[in-house]
Amino acid sequence: MRLSHQVIDELMVHPGTPAALSLRSTSETRADWLGPIGRSSPKDIAERDLEEFKKELESAQELLYADDTWALLLIFQALDAGGKDGTIKHVMSGVNPEGCEVFSFKQPSAEELRHDFLWRCAKALPERGRIGIFNRSYYEEVLVVRVHPELIAPQHLPSGSEAGSRLWQGRYEDITAFEHHLHRNGTRVVKFFLHVSKEEQRRRLLARLDDPAKQWKFSSADLAERSHFDEYQQAYEEALTSTSTSWAPWYVVPADHKPATHALVSAIVLNAVDELDLRAPSIGAEQAHELENARKALAAD
């Protein structure tokens, strides 16, 4: 089972074109992918599709490991309450945890601030045959840092590196060059922006406050960041437009309805693995002979 390429194409930020976030829906796609609903709700269909995509992804992960020439790096970015944690949990719940690792990048440490902004993420890159997931990433350096330019000072940058268009443009160039390097050396980079509306973000933050089981997730910083919603939208608009490439594309996934978000992300991940055209290792004549001897020995045991 695969998602229509028409839907995948719609969600992609095509290189050289604006991300156009203000024109993209946070709740649905223009291209139909749910099919005839009948008695089933869109939520039920999305959850059903997610289960099918997860089964396919399990097989794709095995092939990724067997082929051993590519790694898969999935980058998730979103505003607060955008659904990154839940999406990662649901989409990757079917894969073998031995071949998958998740890294969450919070506020940088003193050590990390004494290195270039790509360093801490470069240390966490997946090996060939494995899946790496970045919950936030080096993109924070052109998102959070752009909205809060006071965070530049602790980075001890050379003179002339003050916050401004020159700094952001330089970082976009560094990021695209870094991702191109990764692709040429066998790491497929796929990037997701979970596009949530301001109203849905409000509902989710309220749900955290109202549910004792979720109150631990709430921070006063969430409200402070929400006041910068429009600034973040602009920062994302420019970052996605400037860094979506053929070798590391951005996908803007509607995030107001979680089941649909999970199904769409899983389908895009599956499509990315398909595009690698992986092959299981072939068995040579000598190895085939050894396997036949082993089979005979076991049968006679």
Image: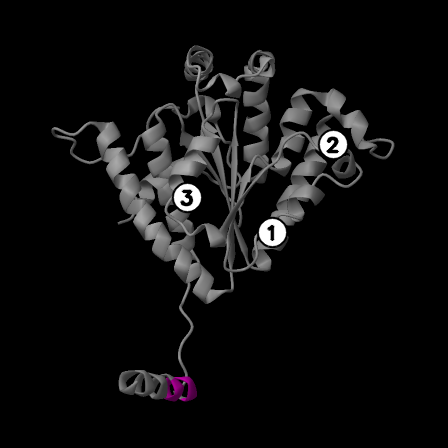
Mark 1: give few (<14), some (14-19) or many (20+) Cα within 10 Å.
some
Q: Is residue 118 magenta?
A: no
Residue sitting at x 30%, y 40%: 50
**Quick check: can you spot residue 162?**
no
**Quick check: can you spot residue 89?**
yes
Q: Are marks 3 and 2 in contact (CB under 8 Å)?
A: no
- Compare marks 1 and 2 and give the one earlier in the sequence: 2
**Secondary structure predominantly adopted by residues drawn in magenta:** helix
Frontmost of labels 3 and 1 is 3
What residue range appears in magenta? 286-290
> Is residue 241 placed above or below 299 in the rendered structure?
above
Distance from the alpha carbon under mark 3 to that under mark 2: 35 Å
Label 1 sits on residue: 180
Mark 2: give few (<14), some (14-19) or many (20+) Cα within 10 Å.
some
**Residue 92 numbered tag:** 3
Residue sitting at x 15%, y 34%: 36
Distance from the alpha carbon under mark 1 to that under mark 2: 20 Å
Frontmost of labels 3 and 2 is 3
Q: In the image shown, does 212 or 145 lie closer to the viewer? A: 212
Residue type marked 1: His
Label 2 sits on residue: 167
